[in-house]
Image (cartoon, coloured by chain):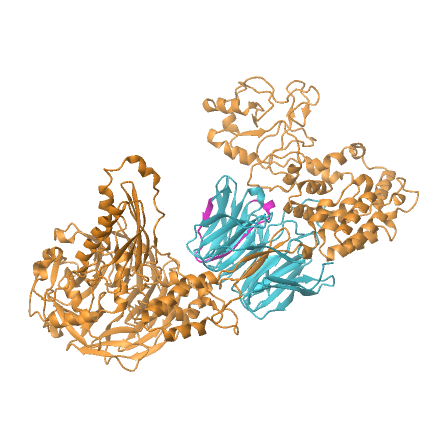
Chain colours: A cyan, B orange
Amino acid sequence: MVSVISSVDTGHEDMIHDAQLDYYGTKLATCSSDRSIKLFDVSSGQQVPIADLRGHEGPVWQLCWAHPMYGSVLASCGYDRKVIIWKETNGSWDKLYEYSNHDSSVNSVCFAPHELGLVLACGSSDGSISVISTTGDGNWDAKKINNAHTIGCNAVSWAPSTSPNALFDQGARQQPAKRFVSGGCDNLVKIWREEDGQWVEDQKLEGHSDWVRDVAWAPSIGLPRNVIATCSQDCRVIIWTNDGTSNHWTSRVLNKFSDVVWHVSWSVTGNILAVSGGDNKVTLWKESVEGQWTCISDVNKGQGQITDQRSSSG
Amino acid sequence: MALQWSSETFVAELKDLQANAMAVDCLGTQAVLAGKKTLAYVNLENSEEGDDGSNVTRVARQSKWDVNCIQFNPHASHAPLYVTACNTRLDVCQLSDRNGNPVCTLKAHSRIICDVDWSPFDVNVVASCSVDSFTYLWDIREPKKPVHSFQTVAGAYQVKWNKVTNNLFATTHEGDIRIWDPRKGNSPQQYIAAHLSKIHGLDWSPDNQNQFVTASQDGYVKLWDYTNPKKCFGSTDSGAPVRRARYTPFGAGLVTVVVPQLKRGENSLYLWKITKQSDMSPVHTFVGHKDVVLEFQWRKQPEGSRDQQLVTWSRDQSLRIWRIDPNLQRLCGHDGGDSGEVDLTGTSYNSSESTLKDLRDLSLSEPTMEDEMEISVATVTMAQQARSLQQEFSQLNTDIPNITLDQMDPVSRTCRVTGVGGGQKVIMECLFPEAYPNNVSPSFQILTTTLDAAMQSRLLKVLSDTSVKFVRRNNNCLEMCLRQLMSILDSMDDRRSPESEASFTRAPPPIVQATAFNILPMYSLGNFQDSSVPFPRTSGARFSSNGFLVAFGVPAEMKKVSGGAEITPKALSELAAFTQTSWNNTRTNPFSLVFSRSPPTPSSDMSISDFFEKKGRQRSSRHSHSHSLSRRPKRQERYGEKLSSKKQLSVGKVKIYDVEVLVGVNKYLAQHYKMDLDDVEGTCRHNQSAAAAIGRKDLVQTWSIAATMASRKVLPSPVPQMEMPWAMTPCGRPLLKYILDQHGAQFDVQTLAMLCCLFWTPDPPRPRARSQAQVPRSGSKVSLEFTPPNYNPYHTVSSVTGLLKGLRTRHMRMSTFEGGGSQSAYEAEMYDEGHDSAVAKSKRSMSWSDTFDTADDGRSSNGLESQEELEKLQHEDNCKMLDPAVWEQYDRYKLAYAKILYNWRLFNQRALVLKFISTPVPQHKGVEFAVCCHKCGKEMRGPQCSWCKYPALQCSICHIGVRGLANFCLVCGHGGHTVHILEWFKSHSVCPTGCGCNCLKENLFGG
């Protein structure tokens, strides 16, 4: 019983590149090639426009909401090489910070788990990744990983803060893991870890045969494992798993699609993966108890239907 | 050769410069001359004033090499940038304050650089070519190495970008030409054997993307269409080597520089007209230079100017500016959209005021232009007309007071104007007929107004009279009409009472449609640098954190231009290839960049939308085209379709799906689950019925098993010797673990966490955890005199850093704490506070630990020496339904579930779950404070002393116990009401008690 609860006519004048609901699922943010970001209140099932954020000088590629403990904060990145962090104060939206230290299109932004503070990672076509953080007093600090991916970095995604990285180290409360994964034009997936304030490459996962378009670290529900989904220009989606103790990652190809895969997204418990790509279709994949991945439904956006193949989830 | 008039302003004679290269910036304000020893900046702005030297600035340069070439950036936004080529090196400099500041140096060529050319489409791209046989493309933001390189067998002598379409440039190699597309790699698109000897100059047509002209040592000037490399379509023999041939920016003309052989003959610039038959007929000779003309450039004219100016630099070391007045322009087939009067009699060249003073050096000769002029009038094409209206719009001075241009549409040839003044408001529309401005005046229509009928008719009369006056002379009239409108409105000002004005508001800002003078972005889609930018996603689906899926995409009625067969391209640069067709169409529309070389055009039109088209569109549009009679409507239709309907169509709706049923956690259950540790069995039964209410049979089963397991009958006995605890039986711990594993495999974190909470056994805090809590975590060098050694922190201030920073302005380093205030469920959300949290907040005790840690104090202090105690502990562990060895794992379930509850805004439920966390609470990185009561001296854990019930802190200034915000010095321990302390330290830096502590200094972090 998957139902459309809202259908938002954004009024964008050009292609939409990203749409994200905020933490509580009440605000929808969309960004487009028309250089604008639009915000809607969708809590009532109606679309109520909140704001139209203009500040980018080129198409806006991706958005990311921050945890509500930092207020209503949204990050956006675009072709104009800028990353803009927007904040709502007393109902009006303004630029909180603009970061323009990339030399090419910024393709991906992702806020870190809120336990780490207000920290943002950005991947750019200039091959570098920036990790921007603030101390809350208006000062922003940026650490840049140069040449993280040759040719360009296409996606970044943070590890959940509760992800187990050393289970044997029980007892002592560990620092939340500061790790994220990135994918780029060198066909590689890389895991980065902060060590003494510096970002170092932790792992290099080879498996794709063309540009990696998106990476998504699965949310953790406390199980002792790490899961990363990656998708690529080679039309494949790969699921990488790690037992949380070793440094060994095993890969499994979820499926080979008929067209380029642009995006992978995990559900909140990490049990369902939404895959979308150049064929304009969305498929949902679920891991069975036996560890097999099956396609449970198709979201065909042309028809606006999700055909649910199983009546209810177990 | 027809020798006619030329008007030339002598600007500067720079005898000692020995400059080989000259460049004029795209704004027409500066010229740079580059000699071996000096660079000279010439201000062209006030060049009319003559040659007193004030407008020339010389800057010495140190080089043993001549500057071969110099060029300014053709984009107005980067006008002060210029590039010079000197031997093997390119220097990019920024002209500011009449001095060139180096921006970057581009070095890669191994031999002398012969030519440079800025891309007309990308402000940052420069092409350079050299005799080392390489042609490089540079991005001046990445000066270390070229972004593209192209190799040929022979050295390259000229490199020139196409002025109309991006991604095309030509290089010359002796008598050959190669046409390149940087996207296609290191192989030329076209190979043309053009001349028998060396080609000195090449210039692309400003309005046809296929055409260019070449000038060669063999004396020929040839016109080419690169799609037909076999044969030139027009040529002329000038009898002597031709150094340069360039198109005129107006009409269809050429300017050539001929190198007289053996230094004898005329050192002249020739102006040619290219006739429709592609023959070249001479129009004019610019006489004056005494030696070879080394360089000439067109200078951009201020808006509204009808003259064109040519800046020349000759080996005779003089810089000259030549005016090409409208009559001369017309001889080159320029229809003169906004130019002066057409004077067919050919007698009164000087009739217009503005040209009179310019024609100082008028040198007349046989006036043979009558015939040519007739031709030029006759060859006025539709397209040029539309262009001239577009030009008029773009050059219009929109700063007329009280007049707002709401809309200017050169395609539909309309313009909407709002005038406010004299307490009146007029909105009117002007319609420009096709033939305008050739003796056809525009029609004016008042849409809405507050004017009375008499005024309306008077206004229309005045406007039509004004317009007729101008169009009779084939002049544009819009601006004059607007000024008339303004003056009429102004004239009513006096007669109106001022209060009526207030009722009118200004109209919204004008929407000017895509004029070339708009400030277009620097960033254009689809240029060759985008080869590393991934192709934009046009569809996607994203889970939100609370059971929704947001999906967006291209509407079903759209399809890819490329057809469905091949996969979607990889990089953004490939978008250009797909949109090449549509881009060509737009090029010929009136919005082309014929008049302006300012920042790029394709960007404004090209977008990811071009990658998609409406299904079935092709067939239907072809159908309609075959029925369209003229070219214009077709173009209009296409253009309109592309701009509005297509882009609109390509934006699909964003759909939000409720996928909670798939996610496996349920908000209804979260709201209705109970958690009562006193009656676990009853709770399980309750939860069972809650699950049954929404038909989750699997959960009903789980809860019913759980209820059985939690039954009082199987409660373990407190005495170890009695029997094996239930937890140790197969139906105890192993069964529960099995159930947990099952739910874990289904990612059902909700059930996992609930079970973990309910079967959680109050566990005495382990000594290990306890000792950890006692370690002071302060990383700073603040002394903590107030903290007793085994103090259990109650009151903590995690936000010391943040708060202190706020006080920095007052040079005060005091910690702050807040008295009073009750705990609320919301505070539980502070549980996962950031360690270096950006948000300042105060942290209170952990409410979930209160209930359980009180009872255990006795045991932990007694120690665990005795065997009996150990046994008892072991038994306690064994009685637990959940394996204590992996308690951290179970904690994670609870944390993960708490996070989801937060998403649902179920803060109370969340706080309940967090109560069961057995992990020691993370330590704060901030400083923890304890207070000694000022009355009884006892240490305490709150703002109030538990013994004497007095507020613990006493204000050092007013000597009253502090109940509200307090600050105190970390060194001497004195402090008090924040207000008092702030007030005190405004004027003092030592402690108010007189203890001698220099509080302000002592509390500065890091000295």
Answer whether residue A102 is magenta in the image: yes
Residue B982, percent from left and from top: 50, 25
Residue B309, percent from left and from top: 18, 60
Q: Quadrant of the N terminus of chain B?
A: bottom left
Residue at 63% in and 68% down: A255
Residue most extreme to the right: B722
* Residue A247 visible here: no
User: Residue B784 sits in which quadrant?
Assistant: top right
In the rendered view, tell whether residue B195 sits above or below residue B345.
below
In this view, the residue in front, A158 or B497, is: B497
* Residue B953 visible here: yes
Residue B736, percent from left and from top: 81, 52
From the viewer's perspective, tell me whether residue B762 is left or right of residue A125.
right
Residue most extreme to the front: B453
From the viewer's perspective, tell me whether residue B537 is left or right of residue B413.
right
Q: Which residues are magenta?
A: A94-117
User: Residue B366 sits in which quadrant?
Assistant: bottom left
Residue at 62% in and 41% down: B833
In the rendered view, tell whether residue B803 sits above or below residue B168.
above
In this view, the residue in front, B51 or B299, is: B299
In the rendered view, tell whether residue B155 sits above or below residue B807.
below
In this view, the residue in front, B941 or B585, is: B585
User: Residue B28 sits in which quadrant?
Assistant: bottom left
Residue most extreme to the bottom: B230
Give the total of numbered labels: 0
Residue B388, percent from left and from top: 25, 62
In the rendered view, tell whether residue B147 sits above or below residue B426.
below
